[in-house]
Amino acid sequence: MALFSSSILSFSTLFLFMLGIASAQLSSNFYSSSCPTALSIIRGTVNTAVSKEKRMGASLLRLHFHDCFVNGCDASVLLDDTINFTGEKTAMPNANSLRGYEVIDTIKSQLEKQCPGVVSCADILAVAARDSVVKLGGTTWTVPLGRRDATTASFVDANKNLPSPSLNLSDLISAFRKKGFTAPEMVTLSGGHTIGQVQCKVIRDRIYNETNIDPNFAASIKKNCPRPVGVGDTNLSSLDQTTRVFDNTYFKDLVNKKGLMHSDQQLFNGGSTNSRVNTYSQNSAKFFSDFGCAMIKMGNLSPLTGSKGEIRTNCRKTN
């Protein structure tokens, strides 16, 4: 057991060391000379898209998460399949679920007109996620920039690395630990579910079969999510009760046994993460501050920098 603990400590130290190197290669003013209007172009397009459809804010935030958790923040999630590889778009966690590709296309098109071949798709994803949160009333954070884009994507790794909404707490903690996150940071990042919606097929088992759920809440969701499998599978339910606003309602809902997905309610089910959920349910400022820090850390997961990768002209395909 001591040897195991020592190995974990060594791995964690090495991970944080490598993370520090990666972070040092990114800079918040990376485009200040090469494309000074980059951030304003991204912000303007995101604001327009989210104003048109509030749900898009959650979709853009989720795109960044699903990119970073599969081989790092390299925009691999945006690549269409080719004869050389099957990409991440059709993996189980993403197929008929991930959205926002067209918004990223619009941003990229505008940036290519203004600063050809300069701003990476990976950086667009990172900034668009931040701007989406801000647009919906949430916190802001400084996004380190300078990521480059991958030239391949992995269907297998997307299926393997993205946490399932059916996971129990111990498996959730393990999945995030593999990416260098502590259990409290996992709770923090899960707070992104304060915006967005989920399909009926993802939550049907929870609302019909689980007991750690408020019965009135379950009954209200069942009206939109009938029991027969295949009926209303794509009907949408809000992840919290103020889904168009980025706030701490998600955590208040968990305390009241109104978590919509199984993995959500696992964060407040008598386990080690209860205290963090309680804190956030009572202190939105603490959640906002921690969320910004956690998003910066997530955005630093294995970025391609320097001469690695490329700057794609079209985010859907390699140059």
Image (spheres, rainbow, N blue to C red):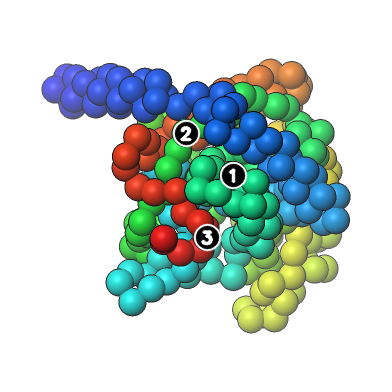
Front-lying residue, 132 or 225: 132
Contact (Cβ within 8 Å) of mark 3 with mark 2: no
Which numbered disc, 3 or 2, marks the residue that appears first in the sequence? Answer: 2
Vertical arrangement, residue 92 with respect to residue 110, above or below: below
> Could you say whether the residue bearing mark 3 is in a helix, strand or loop?
loop
In this view, the residue farthest toward the left is 3
Q: Can you tell which quarter of the image residue 42 is in?
A: top right
Q: In the drawing, does residue 252 fall left or right of residue 316?
A: right
**Mark 1 to mark 2 CA distance (whole Å):** 15 Å
Vertical arrangement, residue 29 with respect to residue 313, above or below: above
For residue 302, the mark is none
The structure residue drawn at horizontal position 59% and vertical position 27%, both measured from the top left corner, is 32
The structure residue drawn at horizontal position 80% and vertical position 39%, both measured from the top left corner, is 136
The structure residue drawn at horizontal position 60% and vertical position 36%, both measured from the top left corner, is 35
Disc 1 crowd rating (10 Å Cα; few below 14, some 14-19, many 20+) is: some
> What residue did someone put label 2 on?
146
Contact (Cβ within 8 Å) of mark 3 with mark 1: no
Which image quarter is the C terminus in? Answer: bottom left
Which numbered disc, 3 or 1, marks the residue that appears first in the sequence? Answer: 1
Amino acid at circle 1: Cys
Q: Can you tell which quarter of the image residue 187 is in?
A: top right
Amino acid at circle 3: Asn
Which numbered disc, 1 or 2, marks the residue that appears first in the sequence? Answer: 1
For residue 314, the mark is 3
Horizontal and vertical percent for residue 175? 40, 42
Image depth: mark 1 or mark 2 in front: 1
> What residue did someone put label 1 on?
115
Vertical arrangement, residue 50 with respect to residue 228, above or below: above
Q: In the drawing, does residue 169 fall left or right of residue 258?
A: left
> Could you say whether the residue bearing mark 2 is in a helix, strand or loop?
loop
Amino acid at circle 2: Gly
